[in-house]
Amino acid sequence: NRLVNPVLIKTPMSTSKENYRQIAGYININCEKKTFDFDGKISLSGQYSTLLRNYYSNGLIDPSISNLYGKKLSDNSPTPIISYPLLSSSKTFPFKTTYKANFEFNNLFIEKDSLIEISISNWINFIYPDTNFLNSKNRNFNFYADFLSNDKYKFQLRFSSPVDIVNINDFNFKIENQHANILCFMKKNDDGNYLFDINFEILNEEVKKENIEHFTEIANNLSKLTKMKLLVKKV
């Protein structure tokens, strides 16, 4: 039999400030044509860069990681091939890499009772398990996140005509515990422009089984956020 010597690889400890993904730019919403397009940048750093920069550059991704890492806003685009031009790349830690993004995409757009309902479920993608993770087999174990991280979404919503988002207050909240924070913020700049900012930060990779409510609080609120809809009224 052939003797195989195991290889031990140690990865450096990194923080949520170093491990981040930021998707920032303009979402242009045409209320008359019911179309959306995105014009912005995707910035990756630390673990996000290691896992995803080859995906944005070449469409290749490690099959052993969660398929949530492979979801992109452009997945909902009618254009069959989307390219992400490389804007900048660093070869030293934390390997900051930035891509340009510009494409049209499809979204749930419903007119109901003089309001336009716009789902944000396809705009954001949190790489975090839902509460189904806590089945009877897992409930007696600690929870471990992939790594300390900061997932950021910064959107300028530009509508084709003056509108009010009548449920804007629903998008202003903060969830904090020892494990993670969620900060959601929306502000009206003028009748056709809104700032929409979401920041999800994992502060502690481990959640002990006796504190599993910290996990469920985060999972429940992330799930709630992805199911929310903008209620838009033309003015």
Image: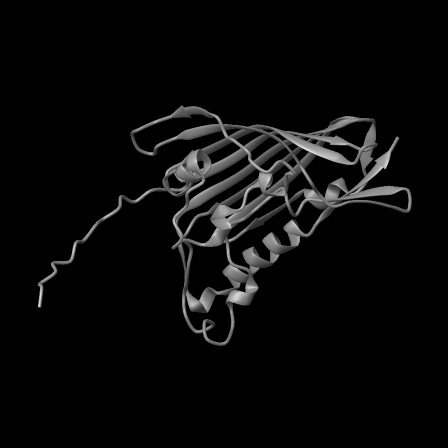
User: Closer to the camera, 135 or 73?
Assistant: 73
Query: Does residue 115 appear in the picture of this structure?
Result: yes
Residue 116 in percent (x, y) is at 83, 41
Quadrant that contains the C terminus: top right
Residue 41 in percent (x, y) is at 53, 28
The vertical placement of 159 against 8, above or below, is above
Say whether residue 202 is left or right of residue 118: left
Q: Describe the colour scheme in one phrase.
A: one colour
Query: Does residue 17 appear in the picture of this structure?
Result: no
Residue at point 18%, 53% (across, down): 8
Say whether residue 1 is left or right of residue 147: left
Say whether residue 194 is left or right of residue 59: right
The vertical placement of 70 against 98, above or below, is below
Which of the 4 quarters of the picture holds residue 193? Answer: top right
Residue at point 47%, 72% (across, down): 139
Quadrant that contains the N terminus: bottom left
Say whether residue 175 is left or right of residue 137: right
Which of the 4 quarters of the picture holds residue 59? Answer: top left
Q: Residue furthest bottom?
A: 136
Residue 167 in percent (x, y) is at 78, 43
The vertical placement of 122 against 162, above or below, is below
User: Closer to the camera, 118 or 223?
Assistant: 118
User: Closer to the camera, 211 or 69?
Assistant: 69
Residue at point 50%, 30% (across, down): 84
The vertical placement of 159 against 202, above or below, is above
Residue 54 in percent (x, y) is at 40, 38
Residue at point 41%, 42% (across, down): 60
User: Closer to the camera, 77 or 41?
Assistant: 77
